[in-house]
Amino acid sequence: LPGVKPRGMSEASEATHPEPKRARTAAHKADDHLVMSGDCGGTNTRLVLFRVSERKCLSCGKPPDGEVVFSKKYLNSEQKSFSEVCKLFLEEAGGFLPTACCLACAGAITADQKVNFTNVTTGWTIDGKVLREELGIPKIKLINDFEAQGYGLLTLRDSEKKKLNDAMPRPGAPIACVGAGTGLGECFLTADSRGTYTCYPSEGGHAEFAPRSPLTHDLRDQLVRLYDTQDSSFLDGSRRKRVSVERVVSGPGLANIYFFLRQHWAYEDHVSKDVDKEYTDAPKHMKGAVVARGARGGDYVCQKAVDVFSECYGSEVGVAALKWMPFGGLYISGGIAAKNPEWIESKTFYTAYKDKGRLSPTVEQVPLYLVLTEDTGERGALYAAVSMLLES
């Protein structure tokens, strides 16, 4: 009703169309030009209903042709289950029923298309098969959130990415993506004989961190002690001595670097009391942001933390270049890169990227790009949904 807030809507919920048009007929049959996509995190879920203008092949370098019919963000804690979120969304969208749906989920997708959200208060599980039966949508697919990032790369216009070296992309060659944010995501894409790309997720962020200097060796040693638990023991009782690269190259990783430097003999006398208090008082998930602000404000220790971060990030991107040989393009995405492009464009980053010994010339032949947008994952989920529609 006019003036009445839809059920489940709060200040945290936002819609593109407060009063969507109602469908002319009951939604008992799926519309073969409609798709639904979603970005499903632990806190919020953003859903989009999209009408495809023409059922034609997707092109690299541009989003799918069509228009957004309805989109809205929901606060997960206000709903009993993910199924309830989807039902509410379709109801508020006007009763339309899409033919295909792709959901990008912040979690590991099982072989039978399920994902658990451990950080949702009520403990959600999304089951693709059950969801398909409950909603009546013919095709539903769950993908990892960084897999969606990979598909999102295919929608980027030239103005939405910045080239960082002179290497030229080779048509049909593999593409890869590395993105630091709350964690460190990595994925790669390969093309079939028609030039259509398929994205494959990875857990590269959990590979071992490789120190490159005496300082980063000391950093690694501290992180071993910091994250050392009984769970990290071998069967013979000896201790593991490993640290994943995500402990360094991520938002929390930046905080870890500062925590290390503030106690290091070469930097402890340069610690700002004001910055250090802000760091200490900040919630765990915000400590990295405090370090970034401190660096922008000229704080010596924070700037050193950013230098170490940029070196480690560049080195890991170089590792991705070696693993996947992505001569179609290697993209650096994620919130950290988009908010702090100067870290990625720095000499420190690129020097570490290309420093790969005998393979350094090969790495420099990989086209390197900085992604300038932060909605790549949402766009990738939509791209994948449209691909599903075109396959039907």
Image: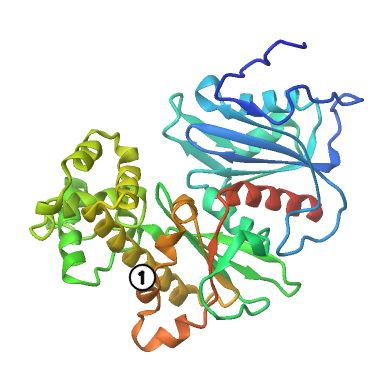
The image shows residue 173 at horizontal and vertical percentages of 62, 76
Query: Mark 1: which amino acid?
Result: Ser
Residue in view at x 65 percent, y 59 percent: 156
Determine the image quadrant of residue 97: top right
Determine the image quadrant of residue 316: bottom left
Please say whether residue 228 is visible from this viewpoint: no
Q: Residue beneath label 1, please?
A: 315
102 with respect to 303 (left or right):
right
Q: Is residue 373 above or below residue 163?
A: above
Please say whether residue 260 is visible from this viewpoint: yes
Q: Is residue 171 above or below residue 5?
A: below
The image shows residue 186 at horizontal and vertical percentages of 47, 60
Asked whether 162 or 180 is in front, the reply is: 162
Q: Is residue 202 above or below residue 229?
A: below
The image shows residue 272 at horizontal and vertical percentages of 17, 45
Residue in view at x 70 percent, y 71 percent: 192
Determine the image quadrant of residue 160: bottom right
Residue in view at x 32 percent, y 47 percent: 252
143 with respect to 238 (left or right):
right
Residue neighbourhood size for the residue with mark 1, other residues' Cα within 10 Å, grouped as few (<14), some (14–19), many (≥20)? many
Asked whether 158 or 35 is in front, the reply is: 158
